[in-house]
Amino acid sequence: MAAKDEATLLAGVPTGLLVGGTWREATGGRRFDVLDPATGAVLTTVADATPEDGLAALDAAAGAQEEWAATAPRKRGEILRTAWQLIQDRKDDLALLMTLEMGKPLAEAAGEVTYGSEFFRWFAEEAVRISGRYGINPEGTGRTIVSQHPVGPCYFITPWNFPLAMATRKIGPALAAGCTVVVKPAELTPLTTLLTAAILQEAGLPAGVLNVVPTTSAGALTEPILADRRLRKLSFTGSTPVGKRLIAQAAENVLRTSMELGGNAPFVVFDDADLDAAVTGAMLAKFRNVGEACTAANRFIVHEAVADEFVSRLTEKVSAMTVGRGTDDGVQVGPLINAAAVAKADELVQDAIGRGADVRLGGGPVDGPGTFYAPTVLDRVDAGSDILRTEIFGPVVSVVRFTEEAEAVRIANDTEFGLVSYVFTRDLARGQRMIERLQTGMMGLNVGVISNASAPFGGVKQSGIGREGGFEGIHEYLDTKYTMTPSPFP
Ligand code: ADP
């Protein structure tokens, strides 16, 4: 179905709180603006949940928990599967909505609809495969039954960079497992989550199973929810500092937590790499989502023997990219999410330049309106530069060079993060050594995009705890129970 025009689309998106199956205003009636980062214009306003509203949402989730857990897995799966179908039917609407509130080019937003909705289809299929086991103890005197049970009410905090996928990959497995949910979407991009919630309602999700509370007071709303003993699980995707604070708060009630935090992905190109594949992979790993992804290649670590050619080819491709509003034809680089993101990217770039980096392209913000940053390529970045330690979250390539494999490994691992690593080599044994040596939760071996609903997404070190997607994803929402029984034989 073709996308509606912007005004008609926005008029059809719910802008209230969803609590207990009812759309309503926030207590006190406050609303906040949602902006188009390409123009700075106000798209619409959304109800601004108070801490009281957050607790009302938890009441609803806790109230719906028992019945939802007792709902047949097939039924839970079918609701998710129906929601997946409804999203396909409204694919263009969801893509346009994401581009409007987040800024990414429309083609990429359409890609996110496919990727993000797949978590509903994947977990619709997993809902009916929750299993356990029956065993015999070594002494032969007892029988052990291991069963899986929904964790209970969950609280989700999602970021703005993938407004659909970051919500669906938490909501999908939680609902499949039989958990009820309160979601607090990012205040910069609440609309996609609100529309997705409406679609789940249309798919037949019972009242209270999913509750949505957008707010400008994330900390104040979150604190009492985490302190409430009815909550059983917190799943967060966002920055490492906020994640650390939430882990500390979650400790009080010993909540189960899933944390998808920051990254600092190395992109290693060996001298035996297929350079065509490496450049194609680099474009995807760096420029997908305007560089605003925790999986974005942050440090290009390139063998000296191929570095000149790799950088030249990459620079040529980057210089041909079209910057503009994500809704315009042919645009490949949209705006950054806000002025603070532009300032942060520029601070990192200027620090690197100040330390002697070779500017091959770009190197600064684009004049307004909108919050755009020029696609930038920096070569020979000094090891002391902040850009090698900090997530750039923008369209900036930063290259360092190496000569020995061990040096590449040392540089790649020289970070407190460990989300994803990209490696380009034609040597199978070297590829296998990288799998064993790189401190990373995920790896792209000769490929620049790794995200897939069927795979366990997640990090090691300070990049997080837990996995989303894959067979592993649903286990984040299940508790294991073990029962001992005597042997049935005398
Ligand atoms: P970013 O810098 O990419 O916006 P954040 O970690 O600040 O990353 O934001 C990710 C999500 O975390 C958003 O939904 C935001 O509202 C939420 N958030 C930020 N601060 C807090 C907090 N103190 N408590 C709970 N949620 C928070």
Image (tube, rainbow, N blue to C red):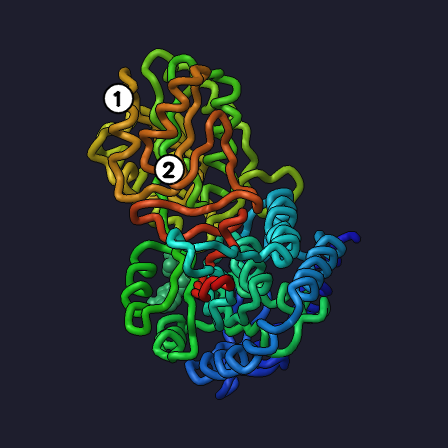
Looking at the image, in which quadrant does ligand 1 appear? Answer: bottom left
Taking the spot 73% from the left edge, 53% from the top edge, the residue there is 88
Does 143 sit above or below residue 413?
A: below
Residue carrying label 1: 406
Q: Earlier in the sequence, mark 1 or mark 2?
A: 2
Q: What residue type is labelled 2?
A: Ala
Q: Quadrant of residue 233?
A: bottom left
Which is in the foreground here, disc 1 or disc 2? Answer: 1
Does 259 sit above or below residue 248?
A: above
In the displayed structure image, the side of residue 191 where residue 354 appears, left or right = left
Provide the secondary structure element on which disc 2 rests: strand
Q: Which residue lies furthest to the front in this view?
A: 490
Q: Residues within 10 Å of mark 1 (few under 14, many from 20)?
A: few
Residue carrying label 2: 265
Please report contact status of discs 1 and 2: CB closer than 8 Å, yes or no: no
Where is residue 483 shown, x and y percent of the image? 45, 66
Q: Quadrant of residue 226?
A: bottom left
Where is residue 456 shown, x and y percent of the image? 49, 45
* Residue 365 numbered tag: none
Where is residue 474 shown, x and y percent of the image? 52, 56
Instruction: Kindly report the distance in space between the C-alpha atoms of the residues bearing marks 1 and 2.
Output: 17 Å
Closer to the camera in the image, 164 or 361: 164
Provide the secondary structure element on which disc 1 rests: helix
